[in-house]
Amino acid sequence: ALIGVGSVGTDLDRLDAHSDLDFFVIVEPGRQAAFIEDLTWLDRAATISFSFLNTRDGHKVLFEDGIYAEFAVFDPAQLAAMPVEGGRIVWQAGGTVLSGLQMHAPDPSTPASKDFLLGEALTNLYVGLTRLRRGERLSAARFIQGYAVDQVVRLFPLVEPPAPAAEDPFDGARRVEQRFPQVAHHLPRFVQGYDRSAESALAILEFLEANFPVNPAIRQKILEAAEAVSKDMKGG
């Protein structure tokens, strides 16, 4: 059987010229390895120009015509135990392969509290700035412009009601500009690039202070660390 997911699943209205093809191939038990190790079956459908095994269950593939795809191979029992949101059965042999299968969305986890997200964002900023003082610019960028921003994005619904755009349960960054058009205009200041992590940290702190009660002690430590980074860069 062939199951489309993502923009080629049930949410076909999201399909556009930039979409990749995400799909599951469902095979008889014991046949998974044959389909994963030898992609001749897929190359017959469209010539493959690049592929690699990105998980034990499947590949990322670029076809000769420029279409990019990610797929995994499972048997029905494996698929039944997996979270599959918006899966669409494109084809199945004989109508029996997926008999009784219940595809389901990811189990909803307990939403993180505002205090947790705020605390994570603030401590990510502080740790990132301390990494920057050590000259660890890549790690600093990840903590400030990556991890901290992830938490801030999760706080966006508390600042602006989400617009009617599809939320991705696996990746909160997807369609954030469409879901939160007003607060998303801050993002360029949050992610200023490899050499501007300190500036990004201060912009994030400013946003958090404007919208949430920021603990004064951690605020002061962040400001002191940012000032120290500035002095380090000026040579004293």
Image (cartoon, rainbow, N blue to C red):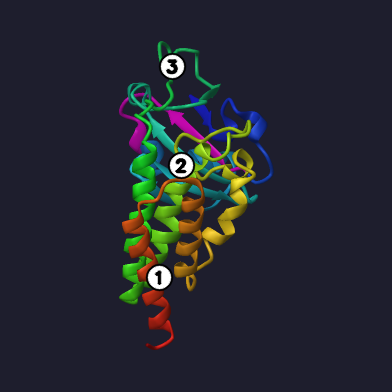
Residue sitting at x 45%, y 68%: 197
Q: Evaluate whether residue 107 shows in this view.
A: yes
Q: Nearer the viewer, mark 1 or mark 3?
A: 1
Q: Is residue 152 above or below residue 114?
A: below
Q: Residue furthest bottom?
A: 235
Camera-side residue: 68 or 114? 114
Q: How many marks?
A: 3
Q: Which residue is mark 1?
A: 226
Q: Secondary structure at mark 1?
A: helix
Name the residue at 52% across, 26% down: 86
Magenta highlight on residue 22: yes
Per the rendered image, the range of residues in magenta is 19-33
State which tag comes first along the sequence, 2 or 1. 2
Label located before the other in sequence (3 or 2): 3
Callouts 2 and 1 close, C-beta under 8 Å: no
Give SS at disc 2. helix
- Residue carrying label 3: 98
Identify residue type, mark 1.
Answer: Ala
Residue 38: x and y, percent? 41, 43
Disc 1/disc 3 C-alpha distance (Å):
57 Å
Q: Residue at x 46, y 48 (%)?
A: 152
Is residue 51 something one can see in this rendering? no
Of the pair 97 and 160, the residue shown nearer to us = 160
Q: Secondary structure at mark 3?
A: loop
The image shows residue 94, relative to residue 67, as above or below, that is above
Q: Amino acid at mark 2?
A: Arg
Residue at the (51%, 53%) spot, across then down: 207
The residue pinned by badge 2 equals 154
